[in-house]
Image: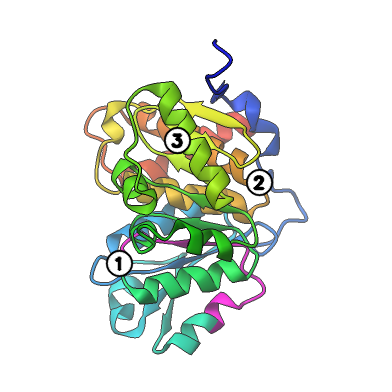
Amino acid sequence: MPNDQPSYQPNSPALWQSLLPKPDASSHKYSRGYVLIQGGYPVTGAARLAGLAAARSGAGITAIAVPEHAFSIYASQLLSIMAKPYASTPELYALIDDQRVGAFLIGPGADNTEETRQTTLTMLQTGKPVVIDADALTAFAMQADRLSKAISGPCVLTPHDGEFQRLLGVKPTIELHERIQQALTASRQIHAVILLKGAKSIIAAPDGKVIVNENAPPTLATAGAGDVLAGMIASLLAQGVPALEASAAAAWIHGEAARLFGTGLIAEDLPELVPQVLESLIA
């Protein structure tokens, strides 16, 4: 490989398998990680998919903060995943301030609004791990520096090509090494792990480490699959896995779950297969 091309490692369990959490007799629901997801309205399915994925990926508690007027929608379709209603911004921020929360996820089903921006910044200011996805990325279109200045802890951004371009003003290329360099440059600029989604997802860290995930079958090109991936990353972060390895592990497990299901995959199928993949990795 020429010296001017960035180096990378192909994603494989050998890179992160030893870091996967293994509950034992002393584990309890809080020690296994508490994920808080910002729930959207009227698009409610995205956050629910992310919540189910977070729970199936091992988080001891998964909760979704939901606007009070959407509470009945969430509560009627969630059992072990808690819907936590809020009627005002201070009430939402009180949920974010809960010291028991181990990681946050914002973006699935969110709106591209100032409220989304401010909630993202509030999550980042806690210093706890934050996954920023979907509309929470678009809410910072051409404001990557504003996002960067607010980051005070582990942070993972999960853009597809369009979200990457809106955030940074750079259109991702299809050529692998150029794409790696774009993701790496963005990671260093924002001071966060960037998971640039695609047939070969690029996972880049500010310290220059790059992992390329190549096990994503074409069936993952389905609505909601990205929400599932974001929930999986948040779950692993809440359980103490470092940001780069949490992103790589989630991407690989996500792809393996899709491979196990095969033709006809929809996003709802993925969380149900995650435990099977995890069992094979931690047995």
Residues in magenta?
Answer: 94-110
Q: Which residue is mark 2?
A: 241
Residue 159, x across and y down, in percent: 39, 46
Quick one: label 3, few (<14), some, or many (20+) residues within 10 Å?
some
Q: Residue at x 28, y 60 (%)?
A: 45
Using the image, determine if residue 125 lies above or below residue 275.
below
Q: CA distance from mark 1 to mark 2?
A: 29 Å
Q: Residue at x 48, y 31 (%)?
A: 181
Q: Residue furthest right?
A: 26
Q: CA distance from mark 2 to mark 3?
A: 25 Å
Q: Which residue is mark 1?
A: 112
Q: Residue at x 58, y 15 (%)?
A: 3
Q: Which residue is mark 3?
A: 182
Using the image, determine if residue 150 lies above or below residue 144.
below
Quick one: label 2, few (<14), some, or many (20+) residues within 10 Å?
some
Quick one: label 1, few (<14), some, or many (20+) residues within 10 Å?
some
6, 225: nearer the viewer: 6
178, 65: nearer the viewer: 178
203, 170: nearer the viewer: 170
Q: Is residue 102 magenta?
A: yes
| Label 3 with label 1: CB-CB less than 8 Å | no
Q: Nearer the viewer, mark 3 or mark 1?
A: 3
Residue 150, x across and y down, in percent: 57, 66
Secondary element at image label 3: helix
Q: CA distance from mark 3 to mark 1?
A: 24 Å
What kind of residue is marked 1?
Asn
